[in-house]
Image (tube, rainbow, N blue to C red):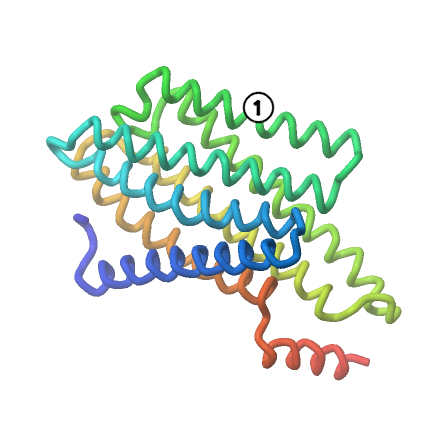
Amino acid sequence: MAGLGTAAAIALGLSQLAYLCAMATLGVRLALLARRTRQVPELLLAAHFLLCCTFGYALQGSGHALAIEPGASRPLVATLLSLGHGASVLGVASVLAFNYWVFRRGTRLGRGLLAGGVAWLVVGYIGCAASGAFWHGRPEGLWFWLLYSGFTAASLWTLSEPLLYFAALRKRLRLGLAEPLVVDRFLLWGVGSVARFAMLAIGAFSMLSMSGDTSDLAAIAAPTFLASGLAGIVVAVSYGLAFFPPRSYVAFVAGRAGSRR
């Protein structure tokens, strides 16, 4: 893309590849875990990582990047964006269901957040499809921003719940009433979710900065993907340590907790 040198272009590609590989790996490992344990939370998270953070992210990025190219095939753009946003809607709906199941199950607030979030996503997707937003691929218009804001609102719920639990468990940890690794996992899940929100915020800021000129679009898109990829690495590392911590990290957390006593 225009506006990036060779080194930055390589960093862009590597950051995107690292993020996608990490998300796909987490999704597959969680799917295998869900198959073994037959637990709903693992299945919902696997769907989120695979549908939203892997397939949806890759297809959306490809579709929007293609849309700014002169002479781009509009049917191909529409196909990529329809499939990409559709996968993302299913993936984000899965994490909304996870939030409800793990943190707010049976509560009126939880039911309201889940139903409202899913309805928001579905209406935004249908509006984008009906208005031609997927055909032209430009990040503009009521329906596009309605759908994008739905993704963003879902990420706010996703980051708030683990951080709230972390704050509560941290107080218990000081009294010896919580396991250090459990507390650390909530923190990592929250940090990863904050980084995921940052990816959405970076994308929104960049899209709002676009003037519509082709060269301007290309120049903005490249650093956006680069910054998003770097935030994505934070997501990947945080989520990886939260759900599948290596023995060395488990020992580190235990040692750190012991040194504070």
Residue at horizontal 50 percent and vertical 40 percent from the top: 91
Relative to residue 41, is residue 177 depicted above or below? below
Q: Is residue 191 left or right of residue 55?
A: right
**60 and 260: which is toward the camera:** 60
Instruction: Name which residue type carries label 1.
Output: Ala
**80 and 120: which is toward the camera:** 80
Residue 118 rendering spot, x and y as whole percentages: 58, 28
Q: Residues within 10 Å of mark 1 (few under 14, many from 20)?
A: some
Relative to residue 159, is residue 256 depicted above or below? below
Residue 28 rendering spot, x and y as whole percentages: 48, 57
Residue 22: which quarter of the image?
bottom left
Residue 133 rendering spot, x and y as whole percentages: 32, 23
Q: Is residue 124 left or right of residue 94?
A: left
**63 and 212: which is toward the camera:** 63
Image quarter of the C terminus? bottom right
Relative to residue 44, is residue 30 depicted above or below? below
Q: Residue furthest top?
A: 130
Residue at horizontal 28 percent and vertical 63 percent from the top: 11
Residue at horizontal 46 percent and vertical 28 percent from the top: 147
**92 and 3: which is toward the camera:** 92
Residue, disc 1: 119
Residue 8 rendering spot, x and y as whole percentages: 24, 61
